[in-house]
Image: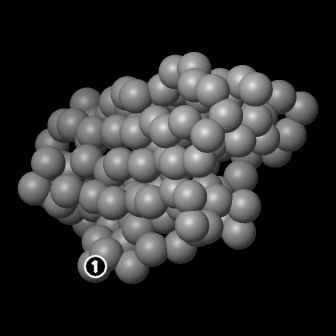
């Protein structure tokens, strides 16, 4: 069964850094877009960053210049390097990927289980 397994969350002080990883496992033929979303308490889930299979990236304005998304296609893994963290970055971070399974024509949307990031002052 295909799934996204996240790691790397935790607690950090203001100005610190964290690196999130998300590995896609299962019978995967190809992966299109991969992305990170986050959801803070009482707020809607929002896009943080996305990367296409060709390497094009997109970022939320709030994280530009501080976060970097990257992917290793050979490992079916996407990363989110988060620097200069702020208290407002505190949220549950979710990995998202458009995956085409082996033997299936269309791409399907998959989500990770979420990983908590807490930034304290």
User: Left or right: where does residue 5 sit relative to residue 68?
Assistant: left
Q: Quadrant of residue 34?
A: bottom left
From where the camera sits, is residue 104 visible? no
Closer-to-camera residue (26/89): 89
Q: Quadrant of residue 19?
A: top left
Closer-to-camera residue (29/9): 9
| Quarter of the image that includes the C terminus | top right
**Which residue does the image show at 33% across and 60% down from the upper left?**
70
Give the number of callouts: 1
**Which residue does the image show at 19% across and 37% down from the upper left?**
26
Asked which secondary structure carries label 1, the reply is loop
Q: Residue furthest right?
A: 42
**Which residue does the image show at 57% across and 67% down from the upper left?**
65
Q: Quadrant of residue 44?
A: top right
Please give the residue where the numbered disc 1 appears in the rendered image: 54
User: Left or right: where does residue 68 sit relative to residue 90?
Assistant: left
Please determine whether, in this image, residue 105 is positioned above or below residue 86. below
Q: Residue furthest left?
A: 74
Could you tell me residue 92's position as x and y percent? Answer: 64, 31
From where the camera sits, is residue 69 visible? yes
Could you tell me residue 36's position as x and y percent? Answer: 52, 50
User: Left or right: where does residue 9 sit relative to residue 56?
Assistant: right
Please determine whether, in this image, residue 102 is positioned above or below residue 92. below
Q: Residues within 10 Å of mark 1 (few under 14, many from 20)?
A: few
User: Left or right: where does residue 26 sit relative to residue 38?
Assistant: left
**Which residue does the image show at 26% across and 66% down from the upper left?**
105
Could you tell me residue 76's position as x and y percent? Answer: 21, 50
| Quarter of the image that includes the N terminus | top left
């Amino acid at each position: 069964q295909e799934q996204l397994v996240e790691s790397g969350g935790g607690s950090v002080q203001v100005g610190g850094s964290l690196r999130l990883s998300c590995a896609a496992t299962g019978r995967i033929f190809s992966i299109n877009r991969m992305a990170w979303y986050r959801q803070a308490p009482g707020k809607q889930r929002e896009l943080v960053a996305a990367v296409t299979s060709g390497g094009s990236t997109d970022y939320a304005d709030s994280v530009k210049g501080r976060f970097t998304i990257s992917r290793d296609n050979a490992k079916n893994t996407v990363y989110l390097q988060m620097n200069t963290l702020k208290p407002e970055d505190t949220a549950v971070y979710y990995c998202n990927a458009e995956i085409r399974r082996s033997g299936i024509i269309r791409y399907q949307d998959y989500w990770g289980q979420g990983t908590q990031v807490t930034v304290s002052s």
